Amino acid sequence: MDSNNFKQNQQMPNQQPQQPQQPYYPQQPLEAPMTVGDWMLTLLLTFIPCVNIIMLFVWAFGGSAQQSKANWAKAQLIWVAISIGITILLYVVIGASVFSMLRHIYY
């Protein structure tokens, strides 16, 4: 083994390995949590048909809502889209089944 390689691979006892510097992330002020009354009003507005979808879009993408409410509204919109997709799929399957049964009855 070459003595130069041995020296490079061996650390001196008084040398500490250099730690990579941690990136600096400035602290952002925390938002005040939503109160129970805020959530009660939010849920009340989501119980009203047609208003609920409009308000979910406003809260999710309007920019004026708190971050927790915006994230909740985005999650709700994703669940709405999933439920609409499943509903359409079920209507297609049930419609095809009914059409198939009616076709066999008349032939």
Image (cartoon, rainbow, N blue to C red):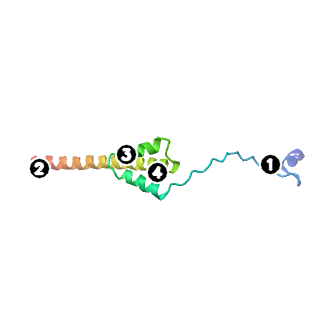
Residue at label 2?
105
7 or 105, which lies in front? Answer: 105
Residue at label 3?
53
The secondary element bearing badge 2 is classed as helix
Q: Is residue 3 left or right of residue 55?
A: right
72 or 83, which lies in front? Answer: 72
Residue at label 1?
18
- Of labels 2 and 1, the one closer to you: 1
- Of labels 3 and 1, the one closer to you: 3
Q: Measure how far apart labels 3 and 4 are at the Cα level.
A: 13 Å
- Of labels 4 and 2, the one closer to you: 4
9 or 77, which lies in front? Answer: 77
- Name, please, the residue furthest toward the front: 37
Name the N-terminal-most of marks 3 and 4.
3
- Residue 25 image position (x, y, % from top left): 67, 45
Q: Amino acid at mark 2?
A: Ile
Residue 50 circle label: none
- Residue 65 image position (x, y, % from top left): 49, 46
The secondary element bearing badge 3 is classed as helix
Q: Is residue 39 above or below residue 53?
A: below
Q: Measure how far apart labels 4 and 2 are at the Cα level.
A: 49 Å
Alpha-carbon neighbours of circle 3 within 10 Å: few (<14), some, or many (≥20)?
Answer: some
Residue at label 4?
72
Q: Is residue 107 left or right of residue 40?
A: left
